[in-house]
Image: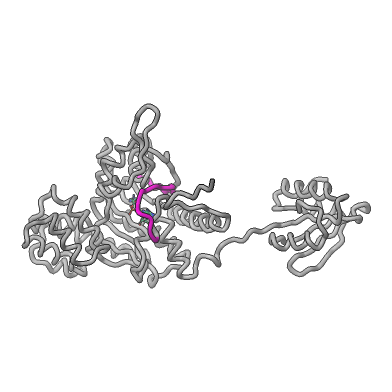
Amino acid sequence: MKIPPVKGTRDFYPPDMAVRNWIIDGWKRASLRNGFEEYDGPIFEYLKMFQVKSGDEIAEQLFSLKDRGGRDLALRPEITPTLARMVNQRINSLPKPIKWFSVPRLFRAERPQKGRLREFFQWNVDIIGVDDVLADAEVIFCALDYLREVGLGPNDVVVKISSRKMLAALLQSIGVAEDELDDLYAVLDKRSRLPEDTFEKVLAESIMDDEKRTRILGLMGVESIDQLNAMADLTEQASESVEELRRVFELLGVMGVGDYCGFDIGIVRGLAYYTGIVYEIYDKASELRAIGGGGRYDNLLGQFGGPAVAATGFGIGDCVLAILLEEKGLLQKQLPARKLDYFVACVNEAYRQAAVKLTMELRSAGWTASFSYKASKLSKQLKEASDQNATSCVIIGSEIENDQLVVKNMAIGAQELIKFGKFLQQCHIES
Ligand code: HAM
């Protein structure tokens, strides 16, 4: 009976694993140099944790399960609610601001498509306890610091930035009621993924009033912050949030990543908990789905029973990122190939035990070392050594009776007969 892998999952064969590790190691390096500490939580949580605060889209995509006690659980589709729960639990003892990162394995029952799977890895970087857009700019910088390190420039990726606070103020001034906003955000978030007429139909189901709808469509056509500033009827809240947005761009400029960033009023985000600056990272050609997204979520900790604490952060998945890096030729060439310091060969069966013993001694002294499982001809063993990318091949043969062995430099092919004791000394192995 052949059992196929589950739809939307991936098998990581060693070369795939090397890609995954290379991506994740880069995420961790960028997080650490930007001053973040790593955390993690459980892979499953109570189902209600994701139903309440993440929003309908994610709730529909949950993999849920019941434990033996009949409790409803779900595999985590994101880690932000877990972060809020963990911070709330120790809110009084954790030194603030909290700068944490994580690389969780996440699960979403989405329809698998290019860049969207049912199981993936997501880099999360969050700052909790800073009620200033400097923190929003800093996390955006951290994402760009990584993307820049792997070779993606402003011609390859763009961070599209807007503000939910600003959108709320503008929509309310058009006459949208506060309790209508969440549903409307979900509709507006789909705009870039739908043909124009389909979007207008979906919008009409949510906003019946023709005039209001026309004004919303007009608002979604705004292309710059200057255009917003020029609007005559800005409410106080709207002008405050436009100013906040302007400051974010100014800070990103100061941080040296301004050329990656642009204003896009269409960025609303699918998750329900965002309250301020929001952004999504895309490939510049806009051919792929979002590489990542995030924003400010000042109410989430309070909604989970803690005090109201400001929070901001982002998530970047591994799938679209890997596709883009591959397309740009930035993926393969940087992968570490398997490498050995020493391959220990023996000229015949009589010296096999000595070869195995020396291999283990080399490993214990910290070298990467291997041997052949077959007492094949020396030429075959040398081929194995070269297939395994060995720097040196140690050959044990009759010379060992005179306390000597041969060391072959695999790169240039030169061979050297050296004293066994000297070799052990060179390798820091006690004889
Ligand atoms: P999100 O927009 O749902 O945000 O996901 C962020 C990124 O995760 C996406 O842009 C995408 O790269 C990746 N992603 C999402 N779903 C899938 C999928 N099915 N397959 C592959 N990749 C996927 C969040 O999850 C927020 N919790 C991020 C955040 C952290 N906000 C504040 N802090």
- Residue at the spot x=36%, y=49% of the render? 126
Which of these two is toward me, 236 or 410? 410
Magenta residues?
Answer: 96-114
Q: Residue furthest bottom?
A: 155
- Residue at the spot x=52%, y=54% of the render? 21
Which of these two is toward me, 164 or 1? 1
> For residue 411: magenta?
no
Across and down, in percent, residue 46 comes to 34, 35
Specify the quadrant of the image occupied by residue 377: bottom right
Q: Which residue lies furthest to the right in this view?
A: 402
Image position of 48 (left or right of 15):
left
> For residue 102: magenta?
yes
- Residue at the spot x=20%, y=56% of the render? 187
Image position of 414 (left or right of 45):
right
Quarter of the picture containing the N terminus is top right
Specify the quadrant of the image occupied by residue 114: bottom left
Which of these two is toward me, 423 or 341? 341
Q: Which residue lies furthest to the top in this view?
A: 69
**Residue 87 visible from this viewpoint:** yes
Across and down, in percent, residue 426 comes to 79, 54
Specify the quadrant of the image occupied by residue 158: bottom left
